[in-house]
Image (cartoon, coloured by chain):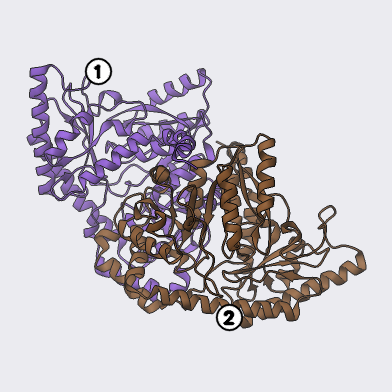
Chain colours: A brown, B purple
Amino acid sequence: MTGTTLDDYTDRYARRVRGMTASEIRALFAVASRPEVVSLAGGAPYIAALPLDAVGEMLGKLGSEHGVTTLQYGIGQGTLELRERICEVMALSGIDASCGASPDDVVVTVGGQQALDLVSRLFLDPGDVVLAEGPTYVGALGVFQAAQAQVVHVPMDDEGLVPEALEVAIADLARAGRRVKFLYTIPTYQNPTGVTLSEERRERVLDICERARLLVVEDDPYGQLGFEGEAPAPLRARRREGVFYLSTFSKTFAPGLRVGWILAPHAVRDKLVIASEAQILCPSGYAQAAVATYLSTMPWREQLKVYREVYRERRDAMLAALEDLMPEGTTWTNPAGGLFVWTNLPDGLDAKAMMPRAIAARVAYVPGTGFYADGSGTGNMRLNFSFPPPERIREGVRRLAGVMEQDIAMRKVFGTVTPAGRRRQGGADAPGPDLA
Amino acid sequence: MTGTTLDDYTDRYARRVRGMTASEIRALFAVASRPEVVSLAGGAPYIAALPLDAVGEMLGKLGSEHGVTTLQYGIGQGTLELRERICEVMALSGIDASCGASPDDVVVTVGGQQALDLVSRLFLDPGDVVLAEGPTYVGALGVFQAAQAQVVHVPMDDEGLVPEALEVAIADLARAGRRVKFLYTIPTYQNPTGVTLSEERRERVLDICERARLLVVEDDPYGQLGFEGEAPAPLRARRREGVFYLSTFSKTFAPGLRVGWILAPHAVRDKLVIASEAQILCPSGYAQAAVATYLSTMPWREQLKVYREVYRERRDAMLAALEDLMPEGTTWTNPAGGLFVWTNLPDGLDAKAMMPRAIAARVAYVPGTGFYADGSGTGNMRLNFSFPPPERIREGVRRLAGVMEQDIAMRKVFGTVTPAGRRRQGGADAPGPDLA
């Protein structure tokens, strides 16, 4: 067996999972994790805000006093205890028994990523179409492309997904004879834009999908991290049928435990469990006990407030720094929650081409192209504000602004700094020409 | 969106993952977990043999002192620290630097199941053939069928996979124009038979696969749980190329942490990482730290000896009970390690049909049909000896023998107790007519 044969077998797969972009992002994070670099690239929660002594004590007891259970195999769906706690968490957002939410229909997953992967495995066949916001979560694009599905982006504006554009996309795809399997959406404090789908649009989007008999996959990792009052209720709180609700404890507790979940329509819950068993046999009993015990014995609602306060302060620091330091022509979103700001560079700048210069200036971000399946996003970057403290955020934006000023100056001298044929078209209205 | 439409979408998938069998096995485990039932059905390690106080203390510190790292996101491949420890574990079995094993080529997975799933995702297309021992691990059958691959079983005898039968199978499939992607094998203390591939056959199997340019996926969860000296060296210790080595800490430490690994050929390691990232983003940093710290600070080699001693005693109890209590005509394997004994029922008995009567008599096992993709195994059952203590094992076998005696008596009166058309053909030579 030679390397050539292995390549032969697997190149097809590598293409499927967009090897290039994934590798690039990994290389980026490797560089960004150097201490001298201000990383605005990640999506990590600020774990130091947790009461780690108390968490450690709890984790220790789960081993010493309950190890015979927590360290053993469990069932594929996840423990009933955790699924009951998850229902309490969802009830905070209005997803409760009144709209049919039940522990029986919760499937515990290895973070939100496995939740997405399971839904994709269940529904997607090669050649299928998935509708998704443009831009959207890079990890979702990886999953959909691994399933050999095509992502068709639906434009956004400051109020989120544009319902008229969704209707047009559905009609166009129907005319083209394409099979659309679901709408994937992050309606609240979206990744990467931070934008929230407005109250009124939530109903319209649901009506449109209902009429088109289109499933909705609602990804909601950030919904409880709002800085300005409550977010509009999740889509799942508004409809019993046709909505898969996905979430995770990665942003509200700790990503290192890898615990997420799906609230599934009852008709397919069992199939999701079977699919998950084929994939991982069962979720970690220890991690599930950790989350369930955290939720039943520790002040998790207070901790949510702590996270919100920390992130609100950092969001403010980010927006102030952008306002004070960014070159003219740069615009950005104004997130009411979550972890990210989405920026539009001045006309002619290419966020990916600029990366090496940014790294040299000791600042990192994720170029916008990572969040599109169609090559859009060259003039955008995603900036994270949840992990770096306020003064580091300001320093990072200062470095970034310096790199941008240089690129703008170069462009004035040489006409362009973007590779041929990759220049952005059109203006720079928030949250971006591709979102207008 | 109606339930009908969901079913419509997903029935195809449910068929793929052998929904029936998986559901049956889950139902079985639900019943088997009742305290009054002696379960010989599971595959669980005896966690109570771990020093849980010390493990708990270690787990606590990983939260309180290192939570900022362990509870955070990590990289898709897994931490270097754990991958280095994994190489030390593999070196115990002879897989070391001299045969090219390196932390760089280790990919950490969510138990052995995700390892199998990743390799399958990378290599299997619908219609492909996987060669596997008959019988084989039920979870592997689930993965291969989810990938829409066909499993062709290769017969075994007391020395494991029969090389001549492997050659015949490869030749037959080549003549039929089928695309065979790999041989999946558990060469040491196999699940479900407990049989070990002999030293001499290991080389022959590798030679056959090399000539046929066939990859080998070596699954080795039990290799370090031998009761009678060292097992023959793993296949990967004998060949640098063409062998994927899969293992897990589920049997040697704790399944509740869900930590396994793949040692992959260098050419595809990166593709496995990308596939894993699409599936779970990254393995649990906390679980990885737990295993790495266990391996670097606790006497894990001594603990292996403890597990071996516990399981050897229970294996002996199982074999003695079978010898003393089983009806004439029953035969079984004689495992030198691992967790399982495979039995052949007296001619005419059907292990699956007998299950309700066994459960009524408060004893559970897994019927042999679960371990075949082709409906074989009606006259077999898998018995686990790792979890129940010796006196419970004897009691379980006593109950089981009683049920079998009844079935045999019924058969003498009514001619048969198996459903029409499902009676076993042929004799009952160990480890089973389908394995001869």
Name the residue nearer the viewer: B67 or A209: A209
Up/down of B297 relative to B77, above or below? below
Q: Position of residue A384 (x, y in %)?
A: 62, 70
Label 2 Cα neighbours within 10 Å, binned few <14 / some 14-19 / many ≥20: some
Name the residue nearer the viewer: B364 or A152: A152
Name the element at disc 1: loop
Mark 2 chain: A
Give amino acid for label 1.
Gln
In front of the other: label 2 or label 1? Answer: 2
Q: Which mark is residue A313?
A: 2
Give amino acid for label 2.
Glu
Q: At 68% across and 64% down in the image, what residue appears? A: A158
**2 and 1 marks on the same chain:** no
Q: At 34% across and 34% down in the image, what residue appears? A: B20
**Residue picked out by circle 1:** B425
Name the element at disc 2: helix
Left or right: B303 in relation to B129: left
Q: Is residue B104 among what the camera can see?
A: no
Q: Position of residue B362 (x, y in %)?
A: 13, 42
Up/down of B71 relative to B36, above or below? below
Left or right: B356 in relation to A307: left
